[in-house]
Image (cartoon, rainbow, N blue to C red):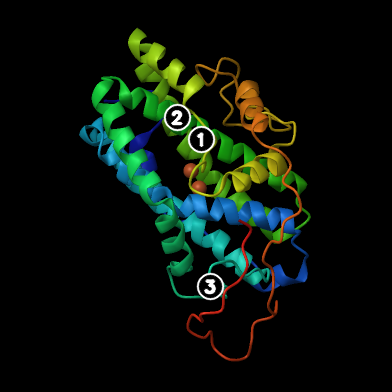
Amino acid sequence: MRDDEFDLDRYLRASKKVDLSGLPWDRIKDHPLPEGEARVLAYMMDIETHTVIYLRDLLATRAAFEPDVTAFLSCWVYEELWHGEAFSRFLGEAGYQLGPDGERVWSDSPYPSRLARNTWIRRKLGSKGYASHVATMLGAAAFRDFVALHMTWGAVNELGTLTGYRLIIEKTKHPVLAELLQRITKDERRHFAFYRAQARMRLARSQSARRMTRWAMEHVWAPVGTGVRPQHETDFAIVQVFGDRTWTEPSGSCPASPGPGWPPGRSGRQNGALARRHAQPAPPRRWPRSGPRRRPKDPPRPLQARMVGWPR
Ligand SMILES: [Fe+2]
Ligand SMILES: [Fe+2]
């Protein structure tokens, strides 16, 4: 299946991990990183790293029978992995230690980082994660046009991520964070472009796909990451990043913005409003930050059993 809007061949040839060469890692500690920004980055780090689990769910559906979709997903999951690692290293160099083990992560720490944290997050999902997997499989089996919904859902989530990163770039006073996000945003723009092109093509040719997708986006969709981390972390990230902004209206022009009428089923303004309706500004919570911000002379030590607090 071909589409005119997105050059899949070009994307597959060019796909690579986000280019972090020359990023001034040693200057991260020289600029304060407010706790609110760190908390959003930790949330996005977790969600970017969780992409492989989303992929597991999707490959159990009709999407697996579409070679162009699976080719894209193969590179997409690889790129998202490196986004998670980039945030992990940035937070570590900024002096943040996260639960459950408070692992110190440096820019040159072994890959993958935060094994204990990611194991902990996946285990905490428990039966909810399996229920979501089964629900996705059943939904895909029941709806012939499931892939159209999947592409639309993906487009909305990539657009939300892209817009969110652009808003952080605008607001942050941390020059290295802004530079890091500029590099990651290039990938997110391509992800959005693929999903949008696929969604438009599939929705255009099927009225039942449009009807089902509209219903699902109005009744089932939730901001990216919902359910993976505690709801108050999703709420905090939405309020912190978007405030009263909408998903299709980052300040200035967003090259990836498809303009009015997108996404189908609900406007960007409505998406933002829905996300914020459930999101209350989080009350002050103890958020973990401890440990020296400067790299110790000794080499990194193996994981210790010391527990670092985490908001419940
Ligand atoms: Fe990403
Ligand atoms: Fe993405």
Give percent across and percent down for residue 178.
69, 53
Instruction: Identify the amino acid type marked 3.
Output: Asp
| Mark 1 closeness class: few <14, some 14–19, many ≥20 residues within 10 Å | many
The residue under the point 62% across, 54% down is 41
Q: Looking at the rendered structure, which numbered label has been put on residue 153?
A: 2
Q: Quadrant of the C terminus?
A: bottom right
Q: Is residue 256 left or right of residue 153?
A: right
Q: Nearer the viewer, residue 169 or 104?
A: 104
For residue 178, above or below residue 155: below
How packed mark 2 is, by other alpha carbons closer than 10 Å (few <14, some 14-19, many 20 or more), is many
Check mark 1 vs ligand 2: CB closer than 8 Å? yes or no: yes
Q: Earlier in the sequence, mark 2 or mark 3?
A: 3
Q: Give the Cα separation between the discs numbered 1 and 2.
A: 6 Å
**Quick one: SS at disc 1?**
helix
Q: Residues within 10 Å of mark 3 (few under 14, many from 20)?
A: some
Label 1: which residue?
A: 157
What x and y, as percent, mark residue 309? 63, 67
The amino acid sitting under disc 2 is Trp
Mark 1 belongs to which amino acid? Asn
Q: Residue furthest bottom?
A: 298
